Amino acid sequence: MLRLELRDISKQYPEVKANDRVSLRVAPGRIHAVLGENGAGKSTLMKIIYGAVRPDEGRVLWDGREVEIRNPNEARRLGIAMVFQHFSLFDSLTVAENVWLGLESTRALPDVAREIAEVARAYGLALDPARPVHTLSVGERQRVEIVRALLAKPRLLILDEPTSVLTPQAVQGLFATLRQLAAEGCSILYISHKLDEIRDLCHHCTVLRGGRVTGEVDPARETNASLSRLMIGAEPPQLRHAQAAPGAAVLEVRGLALPRRGAFGVELEDVGFAVRAGEIVGMAGVSGNGQQELMAALSGEDPRAAPDAIRLAGRPVGRWSPRRRRAAGLHFVPEERLGRGAVPALSLAQNVLLTRREPVGPAGWISVGRAAALAQGLIERFKVKAPGPQAAAQSLSGGNLQKFIVGREIDARPTLLIVSQPTWGVDVGAAAQIRGELIALRDAGCAVLVVSEDLDELFEVADRLVVIARGRVSPAIAAGAATPEQVGAWMSGLWATEAAHAPA
């Protein structure tokens, strides 16, 4: 008997038909991939299964019996758990309180906190149950979602981009966990844009394009190229990453030391590195090792650094505001798309104004037409799937919003671009486009710092690599001289002093 069956599921939104007569069959103990480009309807379909969205048409069968899942509580009672790509956590509550709210009310909070610690330790997902969620990085919040789902002992587990911020070692640990869950009879619906993962992990794959099912395959018998063709109709373009010819240092960080801002922050300790004109420096690291604190210091959100600890084109900017740094050519893409990179309820045209001053006149008057034209230009240049510049940021899929935000900063022609998690949750075609734009920006003479937990991405775009661990930054090493295994070891803080003399 099938664990889950969807028959002709359809969902229409005002501007788009997200799902168009989609059918899906998931057997017990099977890991089933759902693959598709950004905006293909994957997340909407998963939310229908989880009860967060109601379908307009179609039937849902659970263990052979037709059911109507009206809300997530009903889904959880059936045994369905979901890890969202965009997290559903209360910032003001602790990790334990967030997990506890999603479980049966008969379980005591102290017992849940102990279980969280045990599960997190067993699966290599480091978490402190007492830590408030607002102090967590994106990667740490994702761990909360994964642990919360595992504690529910689900019969169907839905995972939306679960490995986007995990190290290679942690990914293998998660895969071992998922295989064990499947062996125990749990069904798993797995959404990922990492084709190697799908081919390695999943038993079956349903491909969506434009809200419709375009294929069902055994991923183990496919290649990355054939899966890409099913998903986007073509293979992603190959990046041309020629040898860099870097110029003078644009960003210099010297002896940057900052005490933690709160009990759960990370102290930055003697951080030093440089990014030169015409090069991309990639920064690897496990989430929660000081990336947030370093990005706040570099962007100007945290102005406590000594003036000379951060230099931009030779000028000490450690105490400068974000606006002043932006005027000097520093543009920044944060890891949080909604809430920091974009205001969810505002239109794309209005979101342009967060970092771009072109539509603002000398007296402070905003030209609505110029803002809309700038947003429309970004939509066209970066192939953002959106109805137009007046579409709300929150109405876009995660990948399309990411393309818009990254494009907004690239289009500003910065002297220095700092981008955190540039392709998190982005499909292979869009990821190739974003990475290609970063390389083109480098080739135009811009200095680029890419902070990412995707090692494949860093090896693809970076000229030099550094690693951040426990608030310290490793010596730089040429990307061509490094290996994923070496960088993975350095992500635990295990870098050798002789690496300082490696070719760079």
Image (cartoon, rainbow, N blue to C red):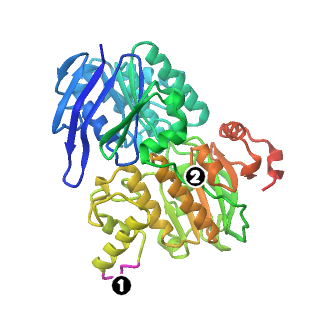
Reply yes or no: does residue 447 show up in magenta.
no
* Pick the front one: 89 or 241: 241
- Report the side of 194 relative to 35 (left or right): right
Q: Residue at x 79, y 42 (%)?
A: 496
Numbered marks: total: 2
Disc 2 is placed on an element classified as strand
Residue 81 lies, with reference to residue 338, above or below; the image says above
Q: Which residue is mark 1?
A: 361
Identity, as a three-letter code, of the amino acid under mark 1: Gly
Disc 1 is placed on an element classified as loop
Q: Residues within 10 Å of mark 2 (few under 14, many from 20)?
A: many
Q: Residue at x 47, y 61 (%)?
A: 406
Identity, as a three-letter code, of the amino acid under mark 2: Val
Task: Kindly give the residue lying farthest to the bottom in the view shown.
Answer: 362
Considering only order in the chain, which callout, 1 or 2, is on the residue closer to the N terminus?
Answer: 1
Q: Which quadrant of the rendered structure holds the N terminus?
A: top left
Q: Which residue is mark 2?
A: 451
Residue bounds of the magenta highlight:
358-365
Residue 236 lies, with reference to residue 98, above or below; the image says below
Decide if residue 379 is in sight here: yes
The numbered dot on residue 56 is none
x and y percent of residue 77 in the render? 24, 21
x and y percent of residue 110 in the render? 38, 22
x and y percent of residue 359 in the render? 36, 79
Reply yes or no: does residue 360 show up in magenta.
yes
x and y percent of residue 444 in the render? 62, 71
* Pick the front one: 374 or 470: 374
- Report the side of 443 relative to 333 (left or right): right
Q: Residues within 10 Å of mark 1 (few under 14, many from 20)?
A: few
